[in-house]
Image (spheres, rainbow, N blue to C red):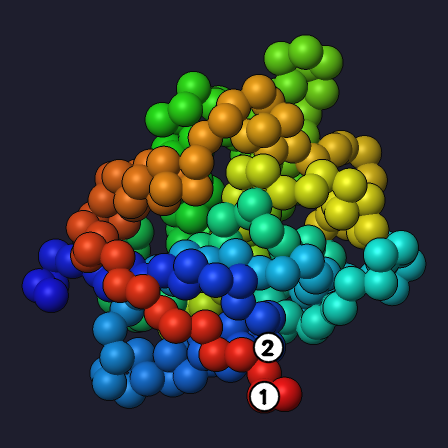
């Protein structure tokens, strides 16, 4: 892999959240020690809810009794589940990445938003950001309502990023009713499917790879599969 490339990984089976956290934290340490490459890890989780550092107990309802986890990232409550493309981004932010300057968290978060918006544009979806509202938003053409299509949550350890973005392709939309997503009560949640698109996960991944190069200035490597580490029986 050259300096112009970045390692892209994929897990094709559902990844339990504790294992994902453990791997991200380990990778962040190794990247800081220059023992591992920066990377983007594409995966899906089984149904669960995660809390960020600003999460409020009253914003969790969880009628299905899904497992809940403290993520340690910024933000509030987030749902993860099948049909949602989660992309965990582990970068050394002490150096620039294309137009994204070094040691600038605001610019990094803005770049994550731009990355997702660029990928959505491949499918004719006009994604936007809103002041005071985390994530990427779209306007439902049928109702005119603004709804969230992608969540963003970031954690940085010694200037190495982990966590990342979660894009709603075709998840069970009823599962979002178990929380107040990101603490925002006034607006809903949407997905590719809800917008009338039958996009595949592979097509979304391809669009993310194309948008990455435009946003972060490096070329994704061929996807390398990461085996899922399951809990022992």
Q: Is residue 114 above or below residue 156?
A: above
Q: Is residue 210 above or below residue 107?
A: above
Q: Quadrant of residue 206?
A: top left
Q: Is residue 54 above or below residue 171?
A: below
Q: Is residue 96 above or below residue 35?
A: above
Q: Nearer the viewer, residue 134 or 84?
A: 84
Name the residue at the top extreme. 142
Report whether residue 15 is seen.
Answer: yes
158 sits left or right of 163 in the view: left
Residue that mark 2 sits on:
18
Residue that mark 1 sits on:
232
Assign the C terminus to one quadrant of the image.
Answer: bottom right
User: Which mark, by number, is residue 55?
Assistant: none
Q: Nearer the viewer, residue 25 or 63?
A: 63
Q: Secondary structure at mark 2?
A: helix
Which residue is found at the position 69% from the left and 35% from the top? 189
The 10 Å Cα crowd at callout 2, few under 14, some 14 to 19, many 20 or more, is some
Q: Secondary structure at mark 1?
A: loop
Residue 213, x across and y down, in percent: 23, 44
Assign the N terminus to one quadrant of the image.
Answer: bottom left
Q: Nearer the viewer, residue 6 or 19?
A: 19
Q: Mark 2 or mark 1: which comes first in sequence?
A: 2
Which residue is found at the position 82% from the left and 40% from the top? 185
206 sits left or right of 168 in the view: left
Which residue is found at the position 82% from the left and 44% from the top? 177
Residue 182, x across and y down, in percent: 71, 50
Residue 92, x across and y down, in percent: 31, 70
Q: Quadrant of residue 196?
A: top right
């Amino acid at each position: 892999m050259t300096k112009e490339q970045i390692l892209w990984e994929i897990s094709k089976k559902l990844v339990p959240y504790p294992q994902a956290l453990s791997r991200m934290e380990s990778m962040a340490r190794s990247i800081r020690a220059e023992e591992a490459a920066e990377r983007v890890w594409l995966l899906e989780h089984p149904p669960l809810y995660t809390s960020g550092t600003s999460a409020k107990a009253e914003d969790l309802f969880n009628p299905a009794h899904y497992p809940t986890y403290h993520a340690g990232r910024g933000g509030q409550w987030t749902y993860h589940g099948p049909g949602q493309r989660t992309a965990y981004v582990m970068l050394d932010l002490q150096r620039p990445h294309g137009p994204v300057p070094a040691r600038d968290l605001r610019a990094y978060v803005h770049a994550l938003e731009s990355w997702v918006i660029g990928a959505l544009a491949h499918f004719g979806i006009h994604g936007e950001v809103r002041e005071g509202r985390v994530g990427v938003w779209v306007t439902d053409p049928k109702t005119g309502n603004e709804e969230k299509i992608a969540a963003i949550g970031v954690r940085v350890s010694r200037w190495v990023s982990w966590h990342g973005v979660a894009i709603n392709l075709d998840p069970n939309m009823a599962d979002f009713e178990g929380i107040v997503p990101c603490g925002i009560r006034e607006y809903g949640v949407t997905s590719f499917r809800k917008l009338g698109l039958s996009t595949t996960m592979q097509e979304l991944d391809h669009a993310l790879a194309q948008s990455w190069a435009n946003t972060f200035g490096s070329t994704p490597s061929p996807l390398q599969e990461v085996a899922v580490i399951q809990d022992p029986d």
